[in-house]
Image (cartoon, coloured by chain):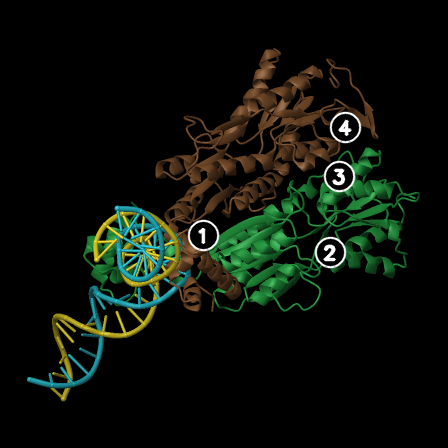
Chain colours: A green, B brown, C cyan, D yellow
Amino acid sequence: MTVTIKDIARETGKSITTVSRALHDYDDVSDSTKKLVRETAAEMGYTPNLLAQRLQKQRTETIGLILPTFGPRFADPFFSEFLAGVGNTAARYGYDLLVSTKAPGKEELAAYRQKVQGRQVDGFIVVRTRRHDPRIDYLRQAGVPFAVFGRVEGELDFPFVDEDGVDGMRQVAEHLIALGHRRIACIAPPPELMFAEYRLRGVKEALTEAELMIDEGYCATGDLTQHGGYKQANVLLDLPDPPSAIIAANDLMALGAMSAAQQRGLVVGRDIAITGFDDTPLAEHAHPPLTTVHQPIYQIGSVVCEMLLEILQGREPDQRQVLLKPTLIVRQSCGANHSVNGATVSIPKKEAPYT
Amino acid sequence: MTVTIKDIARETGKSITTVSRALHDYDDVSDSTKKLVRETAAEMGYTPNLLAQRLQKQRTETIGLILPTFGPRFADPFFSEFLAGVGNTAARYGYDLLVSTKAPGKEELAAYRQKVQGRQVDGFIVVRTRRHDPRIDYLRQAGVPFAVFGRVEGELDFPFVDEDGVDGMRQVAEHLIALGHRRIACIAPPPELMFAEYRLRGVKEALTEAELMIDEGYCATGDLTQHGGYKQANVLLDLPDPPSAIIAANDLMALGAMSAAQQRGLVVGRDIAITGFDDTPLAEHAHPPLTTVHQPIYQIGSVVCEMLLEILQGREPDQRQVLLKPTLIVRQSCGANHSVNGATVSIPKKEAPYT
DNA sequence: ATTGTAAACCAAAACGTTTTGGTTGTCAAT
DNA sequence: ATTGACAACCAAAACGTTTTGGTTTACAAT
């Protein structure tokens, strides 16, 4: 049926050892034999059985990626872009990518365990970290190589890439403050996520510095989906003293918030400022275009994957811990560059656009 | 280091055969031995080496999924949802999912070949079919099991799930016509995609039946991204006699089109009608909410995967070819249920809203 | 003639399973 | 005492590779 190294040995009259060594260009095989072996291999359509190779080498050349999801509808552009970054880099190194999706919890950890113990993967990439992340605890304790997108509370002794959420959010908040906003609310991520901590801290630092008080009622928590942003924005806008600006913790929630505001007849960018985080392609073509913080997700996936692969190959990665400086992308949803029918209208700074 | 079946054999004083058979509950092993073996296995923390199992069984218990992408930024909510559907179902059957992303072309096919020949997967799931799909040709010829989301031109002798795009688009077009639209344009998918054919045909059928002429200039082609929709909508709106309705071939392009219209000061749902296809979560919370055709992507992924798994297990799937009847989701972007500041305003049917 | 060296090759073990085709021992029926 | 049936067990082969530790041959140097 399928052609094996044994068939080539029979065909060429050599031993399987010699065939194997010829194919791997060892120098205890004569050039003429190498040529012969390679030609018959090609002729017979030989491709090595990876399972056998891997069993022998005791390496799978596969890396694991388990995407944490909430609920069945899982339409997060964030993850598909990250996946592409990781996957393409892995492919470039000749590695495969084993992907599954699991809601955080018991089963998720079991999935990690199963893949490790069944020796299905050589290492893992962990994404969307929690403050105390059981996945990382497990991998660390089990001695499995891994690299992470994000950080955790406690010791950061593992390789990671992260974006400086404090700095990013600080830029957003300072920008809004400079535009004259005083009543600034935010829709935070679920608090168990580590980046919730950073993003919230960035906002708080900026507000404190500007001597604005931080009202607890102004801090809602959303589930990172558009629907979550929509719901929480409605809560905020129903407040007796509604905010003039809403900082959403990601683009998806910002879009939901925009939708909520627009449904009330508010013009986003004029009557209310709304900002996001991630700069997914959705942000650019929202109406109005969303002011947000750029996060090079594809590239982050790529770098995290590279780190892991370097480690797996026994090399030290160029950098073991990377913290990216974010850049604020000012578009129109914040009120700067506010445009009416395509014409850009400048709004004077330091003046409340909506009081 | 890691504990194997041999260690258990040594520990229990049995042969490896007996240990293996005990663990698999064969009935030529006494109950007491089974108990002993299982207990020591658990005690020693044994988990089978999947590589070895697979090599022996000549099955990988892995299915392949190669996502076709265009360009590096690959933030399509469609795929992440599909992925979740496939992945969760596979996991339920104890199968793994090997994922990669490749742009259509030479390399893509090479990736299929490599995974097949290296015996890395037992079968494939193919998504986003092309009219003449080389992936399907290859898999068919190579005798590799596969299941498909979508159809192709030519013989449909393989298992697939698809949504009836003709019917879906026909519903959309008829709805718009009923709302009084006469100048209906569309932004079609790239023509090499099979569903372009169906969706376009649906529109054309409806227009022909209503005795509306089909202007070639009214048929733009977009790349399925938001940006593509944005660009093509601008082209259409720049026409001397611009359309009063734009049918986009998917939600992402519809959102881009909405953004283009809104930038020109048009009120979507009043001055112009725009519709999508897919009903991604984005559609519901767009502003205005997008009228679109629902496609249960998660479920489709799940069903396609189930089909493949049934085949892999040597069973005949319940249904080998499924064509889903789509449902039109009427929201506001089409002009029906047009709302101003949250209040819904009915628009009389059979009357042009914008001439 | 012996020794040394290098080139070319290969048998067998190993990786960790499952499966095939047994063997051994016990007990009941003849 | 034989035979048959059954329960319980196991050695060895197989899956397709790579690697270890050789052997053989030829030829040059002593």
Residue annotated with mark 3: A288
Q: Is residue A247 above or below residue A149?
A: above
Q: Position of residue B119 (x, y in %)?
A: 39, 48
Residue sitting at x 93%, y 43%: A240
Q: CA distance from mark 2 to mark 4?
A: 40 Å
Q: Is residue A172 left or right of residue B300?
A: right
Query: Mark 3 and mark 1 in contact (Cβ < 8 Å)?
Result: no
Q: Are marks 2 and 3 in contact (CB under 8 Å)?
A: no
In percent of width and height, residue A32 lies at: 20, 60
In front of the other: label 2 or label 3? Answer: 2
Looking at the rendered structure, the secondary structure element under dot 2 is loop
Q: Nearer the viewer, residue A11 or B212?
A: A11
Specify the quadrant of the image occupied by residue B278.
top right
Q: Residues within 10 Å of mark 3 (few under 14, many from 20)?
A: many
Marks 3 and 4 in Cβ contact (< 8 Å): no
- Tag on residue A192? 2
Specify the amino acid type for callout 3: Pro
Name the residue carrying label 1: B25
Is residue A49 visible in the rendered image? The answer is: yes
User: Could you tell me which secondary element the residue under label 4 belongs to?
Assistant: loop
Residue B4 image position (x, y, % from top left): 44, 63
Q: Visible in this render: residue B191?
A: no
Residue A213 lies left or right of residue D10; in this view the side is: right
Contact (Cβ within 8 Å) of mark 4 with mark 1:
no
Are the numbered discs 4 and 1 placed on the same chain, yes or no?
Answer: yes
How far across and down, in percent of the image, does residue B98 sit?
49, 48
Which numbered disc, 2 or 3, marks the residue that appears first in the sequence?
A: 2
Instruction: Point out which mark residue B267 bears.
Output: 4
Q: Chain of mark 4?
A: B
